[in-house]
Image: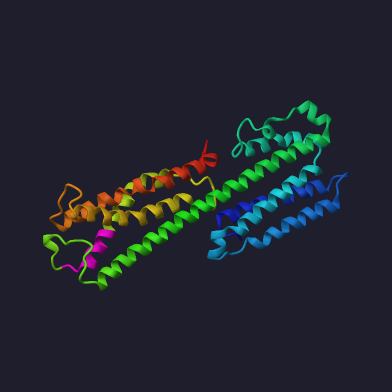
Amino acid sequence: MPTAVWQVRVRTKLDDLYQQLSDLETRAAANPARVAALRAQLSGVESVLGRSGIVEWLRGGKLEYAWQSIHSVERAMVELRTPEELLGLLPAYQGAAAQFLKADEKVLTDFDATADVAEPVRFQAKVRALLLRYHSASDEFHESVRRLRNRMLGLSVFALVAEALMVLVQWRSRDVQLLKPPTDAGGVPPWRLLFFVLIAGALGAFISALPSMITSRSGGLPYKLPFQQGLLKLAIGPLVAVVGIMLVIGGLVETTVNSTAALLGVAIVFGAGQQAVTAFADRRASELLAPVTKS
């Protein structure tokens, strides 16, 4: 059984195409050899529905192979259908393509029912052109989403590693203190104070990101962009909090921190300010997801 959402979608699509091929095979004018070749092409997708390693998860090779194979079979099936069938399926093709193509693209609008049915070969070519353009745009879209997912994941990992190194360096170094302890925390080890500031920054980031994380939609994509956006915010928030408190301690911000509670409160505020830093990722994700999340 498939274990990931994208695998379930692929499995469902495969079952649907197998059923369509079986229906095409029962016709008097069917081409058994062509149907068998398309069925064999689909069977190659079965092998990618197993577990994937982290490298494959990042590259998305199996996912791309699965959908590009399915798209190829869909286009090839056009030549096995009658003009009347294509005319009935055309609204579904156009509706799916409209998610990724501009409304005025010629391949989307260049159809006339009466003229097309009268010229079957030309009609098939126009439908294949529509599917080819739609499939190409869909593949490009998914590749862009995967690249954004990987970039956000890379930034998140980098931020988390940087925070861990900060705590480690502060723990090992007794001469340099990144954060000046308040008067009521004079006996607290610097690394422990830094750790709590990072936690407070993450809390502020979580609070500020919660509304967008709840309302965001992934459009059924396998890349879980809303989750990656939330992870990026939680990873960046602590860094923003530390930098902000450094500015406060350095006198570049007109406020004072006289207690541990005030220090952590300022850290929460600065952690919430990660929205200004991660807004670029939110905008890019919204732009990319607009076609598949529109009502």
Q: Quadrant of the N terminus?
A: bottom right
Q: How many marks?
A: 0
Say which of 71 and 176 sits in front.
176
- Name which residue lies at 16% across and 58% down: 260
Q: Residue furthest bottom?
A: 172
Magenta span: predominant SS is helix
x then y, percent, for residue 36 = 81, 55
Residue 160 placement, left or right of 76: left
Say which of 215 and 251 sits in front.
251
- Name which residue lies at 57% across and 64% down: 52
- Name which residue lies at 32% across and 54% down: 237
- Name which residue lies at 55% across and 39% down: 291
Q: Residue furthest right?
A: 28
The region drawn magenta spans: 188-198
Residue 156 placement, left or right of 207: right
Q: Which image quarter: residue 198?
A: bottom left
State whether residue 11 appears in this view. Answer: no
79 falls in the magenta region: no
x then y, percent, for residue 290 = 51, 40
Say which of 13 and 125 sits in front.
125
197 falls in the magenta region: yes
Residue 219 placement, left or right of 88: left
x then y, percent, for residue 77 = 77, 46
State whether residue 36 appears in this view. Answer: yes
x then y, percent, for residue 176 = 21, 67
Residue 243 placement, left or right of 181: right
